[in-house]
Image: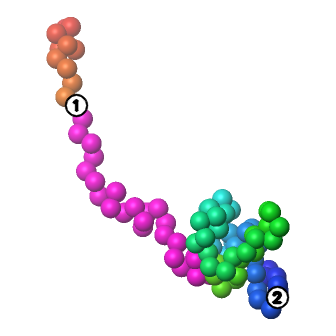
């Protein structure tokens, strides 16, 4: 549910998480880093995010599987060969 503030539609952090499909902590981190355009702080605790900016941020988010796909193609780590001590015990 968007709130009308000064003629614009704004969302709270909890509402933005539903629109963007990510966690509240992630949205707060984006806000701290200034990566959501037009977001404003009301007082010391409440953030308001323009509804259009939340939808735009959703399109720009990447999932871990997409964003780190290059890491998934790495070959598995080579294992050390077992020591011959186990063979000597027999």
Mark 1 Cα-neighbour bin, 10 Å: few <14, some 14–19, many ≥20: few
The kind of secondary structure element at disc 2 is: loop
Q: Is residue 17 left or right of residue 90?
A: right
Give percent across and percent down for residue 53.
63, 81
Residue 6 marker: 2
Q: Is residue 66 left or right of residue 2?
A: left
> Residue at the location (70% across, 83% down)?
51
> Residue at the location (70% across, 73% down)?
16
**Does residue 75 sit above or below 80 in this rendering?**
below
* Front residue of this view, candidates 40 and 83: 40
User: Which residue is at the far front?
Assistant: 43
The quadrant of the rendering that contains the C terminus is top left
The kind of secondary structure element at disc 1 is: loop
Quadrant of residue 35 within the rendered picture: bottom right
> Residue at the location (79% across, 80% down)?
1
* Front residue of this view, candidates 48 and 88: 48
Tell me, yes or no, if residue 15 can be seen here: no
Give percent across and percent down for residue 58.
58, 76
> Residue at the location (27% across, 42% down)?
77
Magenta stretch holds residue 84 = no
Give percent across and percent down for residue 75.
25, 50
Q: Is residue 43 left or right of residue 38?
A: right
Q: Where is mark 1, residue-wise?
A: 80
Quadrant of residue 42 within the rendered picture: bottom right
**Does residue 8 sit above or below 63 in this rendering?**
below
Mark 2 Cα-neighbour bin, 10 Å: few <14, some 14–19, many ≥20: few
Instruction: Report the mark closest to the observer, 2 or 1.
Output: 2
Magenta stretch holds residue 64 = yes
* Range drawn in magenta: 55-79
């Amino acid at each position: 549910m968007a709130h009308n503030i000064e003629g614009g539609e704004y969302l709270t952090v909890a509402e933005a998480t539903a629109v963007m499909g990510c966690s509240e902590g992630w949205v707060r981190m984006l806000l701290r880093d200034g990566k959501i355009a037009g977001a404003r702080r009301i007082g010391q605790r409440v953030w308001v995010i323009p509804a259009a900016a939340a939808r735009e941020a959703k399109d720009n988010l990447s999932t871990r599987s997409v964003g780190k796909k290059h890491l998934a193609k790495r070959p598995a780590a080579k294992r050390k060969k077992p020591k011959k001590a186990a063979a000597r015990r027999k």
